[in-house]
């Protein structure tokens, strides 16, 4: 297993203009400029095609906690599509499964 114990720079995923670190080890998105603001990956709703979704409050920069009427969504609330972890944090995902760091960054022998 290569690089399993080396520190690394966490990837960043931008949600509605706010940068969040993707921390697969802790299963969270952590705001770059406000690290106390965290979104648990368990808050994601799984959808079709390996994508997940999140109801996001642009004012709180976190999950929208109230029930939404699809016909009357507040203007500060967005549905955010989140790509699979394999795309967001391939190294973190590989480490979570005890695989080599490059396990998900290669496709048919070529780097993707």
Image (cartoon, grey):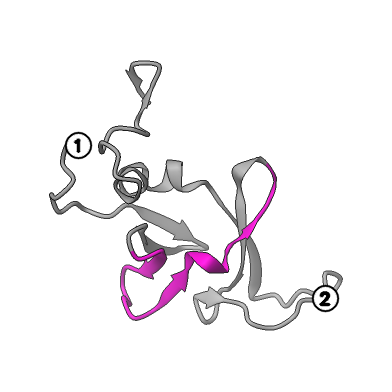
Tell me: residue 15, above or below residue 61. Answer: above
Instruction: Give x and y (percent) for residue 61.
Output: 49, 75
**Figure quadrant of residue 12:** bottom left
Whichever of labels 2 and 1 marks the residue nearer the N terminus, that label is 1
Residue in the picture at 54% in, 80% down: 59
Residue in the picture at 37% in, 70% down: 31
Tell me: residue 33, above or below residue 48. Answer: below
Tell me: residue 37, above or below residue 30. Answer: below
Q: Is residue 54 left or right of residue 75?
A: left
Is 28 covered by the magenta stretch?
yes
Residue in the picture at 44% in, 58% down: 14
Question: Which residue is label 1 attached to?
Answer: 1
Instruction: Give x and y (percent) for residue 63.
Output: 56, 75
Instruction: Give x and y (percent) for residue 17.
Output: 47, 63
Residue furthest top as drawn: 109
Seen from the viewer's position, the closer of residues 61 and 40 is 40
Crowd band around label 1 with a 10 angstrom C-alpha radius: few (<14), some (14–19), many (20+): few
Is 33 covered by the magenta stretch?
yes
Q: Name the quadrant of the N terminus.
A: top left
Crowd band around label 2 with a 10 angstrom C-alpha radius: few (<14), some (14–19), many (20+): few
Q: Is residue 49 left or right of residue 60?
A: right
Residue in the picture at 29% in, 47% down: 95
Q: Magenta residues, as a range?
A: 26-48
As drawn, the label of residue 69 is 2
Q: Is residue 67 left or right of residue 78?
A: right
Secondary-structure class at tag 2: loop
């Amino acid at each position: 297993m290569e690089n399993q114990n080396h520190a690394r720079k966490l990837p960043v995923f931008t949600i509605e203009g706010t940068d969040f670190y993707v921390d697969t080890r802790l299963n969270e998105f952590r705001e770059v400029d406000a690290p106390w603001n965290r979104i648990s990956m368990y808050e994601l709703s799984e959808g079709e095609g390996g994508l997940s979704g999140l109801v996001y409050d642009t004012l709180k920069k976190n999950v929208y906690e109230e029930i939404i009427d699809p016909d009357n969504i507040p203007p500060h609330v967005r549905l955010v599509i989140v790509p699979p972890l394999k795309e967001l944090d391939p190294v973190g995902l590989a480490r979570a499964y005890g695989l080599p760091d490059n396990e998900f960054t290669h496709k048919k022998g070529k780097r993707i």
